[in-house]
Image (cartoon, coloured by chain):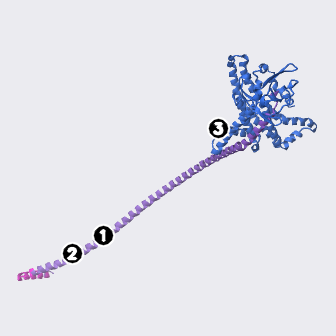
Amino acid sequence: MELVTPSYGLLFWTGLTFCLLLFVLTRFVWKPLLKSVNARSKIIEEALKEAEKARQEMQALNAENERILKEARVERDAILKEAKDAGTKMIEEAREKAKAEGVKLMESAKSAIESERNAAITEMKAQVAIFSVEIAERMIRESWSSDAKQKELASKLAEELKLN
Amino acid sequence: MKNAAFNAILVLVGSFFFSSSVLRANEEFSIMHHIQDAHEWHLWGEGHSASAISLPIILIDKGVKCFSSSHLYHGKQQQDTLKDGSVQTYLIGVGPAKGYALLHEKIYKLAAVRLTFHNGHPHNETPWDFSITKNVLSLFVGGLLLLIIMLVTANFYKRKGPVAPQGLAKFVEPLIVFVRDEIAIPNLPDGKHVKYIGFLTTVFFFILINNLLGMVPVFPGGANLTGNITVTFFLACCTLVITLFSANKNYWKHIFATPGVPKALLPIMIPIEVVGIFTKPFALMIRLFANMTAGHIIILALFSIIFLNKSVAWAGLSVPMALFISVLEVLVAFLQAYLFSMLSALFIGAAIEDDHH
């Protein structure tokens, strides 16, 4: 019978202890603990979201990088091609110019040589004329140095005149 | 009067325990004595050579009277032969306990030298007994242990902030989160659990720690606290009070004007529904009480085999069986704590449920 009879003494102490526990534990344990558990799960959730976002950003960044790299490659190729073209063109131009210059130079050299030769020839002609006159003078002087010779010459010249 | 109220339970639930001849076979070694409350904490030994811790007795009888229970237990032993031939043995207090007698762990006021019996029961007055009994001490130890464990855990979060649990918190936190996520939230949805989480968690851990403490065979464990009807009665009352005070209009409408029931049937329905209010916490009370008491009785009965047969050879049978039951009881300790808080949440949840007809 005592087994199923509540005793008020124990009831009182149980009530007191339980109510104290209820108050203290709710106030100092359950609420702050669940609060920090909630805070933690929120932090974890946010961290996961952040990680996902970072992953996506990373992916976007990678794609962007890839794109930029591709563009840069294309640009580099274009620049290289352009430079090559420009180089070829410049060389070509230089060659043309050099050729023209050469021709021009040669021509002017030719004309200079021509005019020099002409001048030389003219001078030589004049010199030869001077020498011829001198030689003729000396020969004339020689041939006219004796009477025999003067007679012979006069006869010869008369011969020639006769023939004519 | 109180006894009469619980006669029904006795017949329904307790008859098995009481009629068992094994339990009554040896007055010296009484299982019933072990699972009930006492004014001293018996350690070992029998009779006068027994070692026990004397506990303080607090009586309210024309002022507060405090004295050690040893003044009763080491008082004068009195044997009275009643008119019907049965023998009643009780203790008469000495020293500060003079004027009081102890019969079946109940304190009576002595009007004369002896107790006066009427129909086999003492007719004497009883003082208000607020003694620190075995169960009360166990209650304090359990409460203190719970408080220490929980405050250490709470302190961890206070120091470290919202981080992964370590040490004691690693063990306690999952249980608290379990109570919230598996007990409170499913039964009290839409954020309504916040109001009741304190009660549910406290009840869960209060029952759990006292169940487990009851499984410890040495002092300060072993008291059958959660298998004491007073404790389960109090806890069930808490659930009842919370249910009634948080009940909404729908709850009362279902009781006093059950929808879909003809008016003519209401005189029958209303008493049934009103009784229904009380049967739920009553079932809570009986469930915890019977489960824990039964566990204690089984283990004690298995160990009794050795002593009843007066042969240590029986230990080969009784020890493995008792070990098996003990392991089962650890499971039951968790299970009952879970069931009590879960059903409390269920009852409260049903009382605050919105109308969905």
Q: Which amino acid type is marked by label 1?
A: Ala
Q: Which amino acid type is marked by label 2?
A: Met
Q: Are marks 1 and 3 in contact (CB under 8 Å)?
A: no
- Asked whether A147 falls inside the magenta stretch, the response is yes
Tell me the subunit letter for badge 2.
A
Q: Which residue is mark 3?
A: B168
Furthest-right residue in this view? B264
A142 over B53 or under it: above or below: below
Give the residue at x 87% y 39%: B255
Tell me the subunit letter for badge 1.
A
For discs 1 and 2, the disc positioned in front in the rendered view: 1
For discs 2 and 3, the disc positioned in front in the rendered view: 3
Expressed as whole percent of the image width and height from the top left, the position of residue B56 reads 75, 33
Of the pair B2 and B16, the residue shown nearer to us:
B2
Q: Which residue is mark 1?
A: A109
Q: What whole-number distance in Å separates the C-alpha atoms at marks 1 and 2?
A: 22 Å
Residue B257 seen in the current view:
no
Of the pair A146 and B175, the residue shown nearer to us:
B175
- The answer to whether marks 1 and 3 sit on the same chain is no
Left or right: residue A21 versus residue A59 is right
Under tag 3, what secondary structure? helix
Left or right: residue B41 versus residue A158 is right
Expressed as whole percent of the image width and height from the top left, the position of residue B345 reads 77, 38
Q: Which residue is mark 2?
A: A124
Tell me the subunit letter for badge 3.
B
Chain B: colour as depicted: blue
Expressed as whole percent of the image width and height from the top left, the position of residue B210 reads 72, 33
- The answer to whether marks 2 and 3 sit on the same chain is no
Quarter of the figure with the C terminus of chain B: top right
Q: What whole-number distance in Å separates the C-alpha atoms at marks 2 and 3?
A: 131 Å
